[in-house]
Amino acid sequence: MDAYLQVNNRRQSFRSTYRLNAVCLIALAFLSFAGCNADSTFGPTQPVDLEAAERSVFSQFGEDGVIEKIFEVIKPGPKFAVEFGAYDGLKNSNMRNLIVNHDWGSFQIEGDAARAKKLAQTYKNYSKVRTKQAWIWPGNIEILFEEGGVPKDLDLLVIDIDSNDYYVWRAIHEFRPKVVMIETNMFFPPPELMVIDFHPMNYWDNTYYVGASMQSMVNLGKKKGYELLYQMTRGPNVFFVAKEYFDQFGIKDNSPETIYRERSPAHMNRQQVKWGRNGVPWPKGKATLKWTNLEIEKKFRFNR
C-alpha cells in the first residue's frame, strides 16, 4: 500500500510540474510575441522623432537622416529605391547614401541629357544601380519602371520633377512603394486645394506655379492608401508612408494643418507677392511657360 501511495504521489507531482511548465511556456510565448510585435501592433509609446533625425550625407536638406530613420522603424524589403529628377547622382542626391552606405539598389531617371550622362558615369561600377535619360510624364512612368527592373514592392520612391509631380504619382498603380517622398507647393497652406493644370511640357520657371498643395497631395495619398508622415524643416519635401505602416511611428495627429510648416519667402527664395492669384498679374515675362514654338497658359486647379 505504501509503495502504491508513493507511486501515485510521484504521478501527481509530475502532472503538477508538467502543467506549471506548460503554463510558463505559454506565458513566455505570449510575452515574446507581444514584445516582438509591440511596434507593429500597438505602436511606440512616443512618436518617432523624425526632425531629430534630419542630417545630410549627400541630400540637400537633411533627407538622408530621415530616410534612414524611417527604415529603422519599418524594415526595407528589396532595399530598392527610385528617384526621378535625379540630376547627376551626386548633387543633392537622395539615393547616394542608400547606395554607398547601405548597399541598396536603385533606378534613377534624369531628363537632361548632359546630367543623365554624368549620372550614368557616377554609378557605372554599381551593379545594383540602373540609370536612364528620359523625361517623365504620366503616360510613360510605369513603362520606365518595367524597363528599369523596378520591383513592384519597392521601398522608396522620390518624385522631384518641379512640375507634374501630382499627376505622375496619380498615374502609378502597379507599383506600391512603402514610402513616397514628394515636393509640395508650400505657398498654398492647408486646407487650400491647388494643382497646376496638366501639360506634358510643364516646367518650373522659378515662380510658385509648380506642383500641388500639401492638402491636394494628402487627398491623393489617401486615395492611394498612404498617410502623411513628415515635412522637412527646410525645403518642400514631404514624406508619405503606406497606411499599414503608419501606426509604427506613434503619430497621433497627422492632419495637414498639424504637419505643415509655413515658409518665408526669403527661405524659399521667392517673392512675397502672390503672382496670378486674386487678380494680381504675373510679373512681366512670367504669364506663360515658354518654349521655342509653344506657350503654355498658367492655370490653377482648385478642386483636387
Image (tube, rainbow, N blue to C red):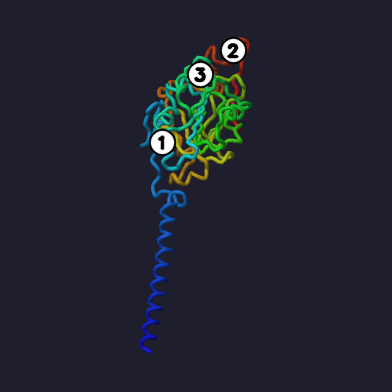
Q: What residue type is labelled 1?
A: Glu
Dot in front, 3 or 2: 3
Q: In this view, does 251 lie above or below 143?
A: below
Measured in 3D between alpha carbons, the distance from the residue under mark 3 to the one under mark 1, in whole angstroms, is: 26 Å
Which quarter of the rendering shows the N terminus? bottom left
- Residue linked to disc 1: 68
Question: On screen, 86 above or below 14?
Answer: above
Q: Earlier in the sequence, mark 2 or mark 1?
A: 1
Query: Which amino acid does the dot numbered 3 rest on?
Result: Ala
Q: Which of marks 3 and 1 is in front?
A: 3
162 or 265: nearer the viewer: 162
Q: Residues within 10 Å of mark 3 (few under 14, many from 20)?
A: many
Specify the label residue 291 is tagged with: 2
Secondary structure of the residue carrying numbered label 3: helix
Question: Which percent across, then down, holds residue 299?
Answer: 60, 23
From the viewer's perspective, is the residue at label 2 or at label 1 nearer? 1
Residue at 51% of width from left, 39% of height from top? 178
Mark-to-mark CA distance, 3 and 2 = 21 Å
Sequence-wise first label, 3 or 1: 1
* 46 relative to 153, above or below: below
For marks 3 and 2 on the same chain, the one whose residue lies earlier in the sequence: 3
Residue 55 falls in which quadrant of the image? top left
Label 2's element?
strand
In three-dimensional space, the C-alpha distance between marks 2 and 1, rounded to whole angstroms, equals 40 Å
Instruction: Answer whether labels 2 and 1 touch (C-beta < 8 Å).
Output: no
Residue 161 visible in the picture: no
Query: Label 3, on which residue?
Result: 116
Quick check: 132 left or right of 67?
Answer: right
